[in-house]
Amino acid sequence: MSYRSILVQIDIDGATEPRIRFAKEIARRFDAALIGYCAAQPHPAVAPMDGAIVAGELIRRETEEIQARLDEIARVFAEMAGIDSSFRGMVGDPTRSLTELARLADLIVAGPRDEHQGRDGYRAVDLGALILSAGRPVLVTTRNQAALKGDRLLVAWKDTREARRAVVDSLPFLKTAHEVNVVTVEEDDRAHARESLADVVAFLAAHGVKARSECLMPADEEFGDTLSTTAFEMGADLVVSGGYGHSRLREWAFGGVTRRLIEASSTNRLFSN
């Protein structure tokens, strides 16, 4: 498999060029079409009954401001992305609209939450909700959005649907990597953990990916933190993981890894659900 279309999410606030440049390089690597996306919606204006006209005017002005910004981002995207590209700008819920547009793409490229945006769901994408609902792998860039080399990859393994999906969805990156390390954590059933780890390595070998494996002993710290440390030690510039929702928080340490990895913006992360 390969990525034939890549959908890049661009924040309406903040710099646009680094994200576009990051996604363009990945599209070039896989000879894929690049689709730009940006959305925001006006905040609801709360006003007494006799202030309905004022509230409506505030919404109208914010809508115009959003549209003007979308037009500017579309112009920058067209200049940077090249011929085999298109842009979707929307006045609407950023997360829901992106989830719907996921049908266009093999891979979604998104960025870490901007510290200045906070959790404003009217102007920023909720990464957790996107990962759990898009039905496509989501690649979250580092904070500085430097180009992804993809030389060293770390696969966070647990024998679940999400992790199995993540391994398959990341194959284009795994096939071009120079070093792949598949990591799991030993629980009560250590034999099963090691057996499933060996099966993943064999699966990857059948796809031309030479990988090594590592079993980590349970630690007091959250596995997301251990994973980040392991990625740093091996010099990994991409971590592959299943995207786990709240329903799995008590099932295994990986339940918290999605949240931890979303916060670990020093490493590129690819999530599948």
Image (cartoon, helix red, strand yellow):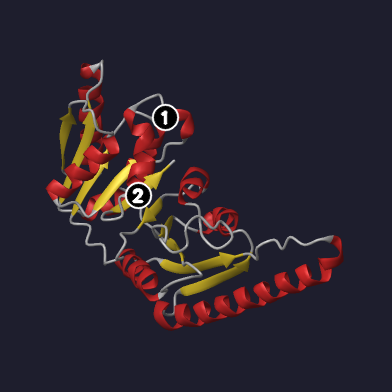
Q: How many marks?
A: 2
Q: Residue at x 25, y 20 (%)?
A: 187
| Residue annotated with mark 2 | 263
Which mark, by number, is residue 76?
A: none
Q: Nearer the viewer, residue 118 or 49?
A: 49
**Mark 2 falls on what kind of element?**
helix
Q: Nearer the viewer, residue 146 or 174?
A: 146
Q: Quadrant of the C terminus?
A: top left
Q: Mark 1 is on which residue type?
A: Leu
Q: Residue at x 19, y 46 (%)?
A: 231
Single out the residue that lies furthest toward the right.
Answer: 50
Question: Would you say 108 lies left or right of 237 here?
Answer: right
Q: Residue at x 30, y 50 (%)?
A: 264
Query: Residue 140 at x, y = what percent?
Result: 37, 55
| Residue annotated with mark 1 | 249
Q: Nearer the viewer, residue 269 or 168?
A: 269
